[in-house]
Image (cartoon, rainbow, N blue to C red):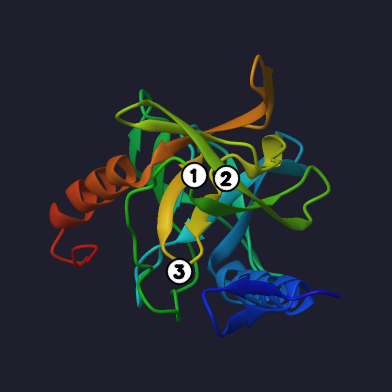
Amino acid sequence: MACLRFGLDAELDPYQLALAKQINDKNINEKMCRYMLCLKYKHADGSLHAAGSAFYVMHGQRLAVTAAGTNQIVACYPDGRQSDVITLGEDRIANISIIKVDATCPLPTVRHTAPNVGDTVYLLGFSSASKLNFTKGMVTSMEQAAIFTTDAYADNGFSGGPVFNLHMELVGMVLCGAEVTNQGTQVRCVNVAKVEGFVSGITAASPAFGLWS
């Protein structure tokens, strides 16, 4: 296979480039999936069905971010435990909730940055079968200050899941599953600035929580 040449003495094998991208994708998935929690809706008879996704944001805290509408929701943990969640705050206009769960985040506080059109992004979320999925795409538009879209795939189970960039920085949260538009299949996400502002407002109001930094 011919190498790509850059300048006089720089060259790059396309196979090696593709392999490096694949390794990076797998590394991002492996690290970022540890921030995830599966949410399920509890029926009156006690039965559960898949409801959406949530993710930790602060080290050492029992806090997670998800989409609004967290009544009768149960969090499911990797060790098989389940617990009811407590809603600490909810912004129904922006569709963001911050919940208290029954597990402390052992991971570093997630870094965050603003998304830009053309950025490569990764979406994590639980499908209707409660299986964690990882998809990749690009930021395709900034609809308004608080909303952007991506062509990465997501079904309704991704709602409340995080959107990360190549540097494993949080850039937003998935609002809903993919929608068919004139530009093709698109997923709407809320900008990280909106998530950050909401989380910081809730945590700053209580001395038990540190600011998201």
Badge 3: residue crowd in 10 Å (few <14, some 14–19, many ≥20): few
Q: Amino acid at mark 1?
A: Gly
Q: Where residue 168 sits: x, y (%)?
A: 47, 68
Mark with earlier residue (2, 1): 1
Q: Where residue 80 sits: x, y (%)?
A: 72, 71
Q: Secondary structure at mark 2?
A: strand
Badge 1: residue crowd in 10 Å (few <14, some 14–19, many ≥20): few
At x 76% / y 46%, what residue is drawn?
127
Q: Where residue 111 sits: x, y (%)?
A: 34, 67
Q: Secondary structure at mark 1?
A: loop
- Report the residue marked by disc 1: 118
Q: Amino acid at mark 2?
A: Met
Q: Amino acid at mark 3?
A: His
At x 65% / y 14%, what residue is drawn?
182
Quarter location, residue 11: bottom right
Marks 1/3: CA–CA distance: 14 Å
At x 53% / y 80%, what residue is drawn?
8
The outermost residue toward the top is 182
Marks 3/2: CA–CA distance: 14 Å
Q: Split into 4 quadrants, where in the image is the N terminus?
A: bottom right
Residue 190 as seen in the image, left or right of residue 131: left
Q: Are marks 2 and 1 in contact (CB under 8 Å)?
A: yes
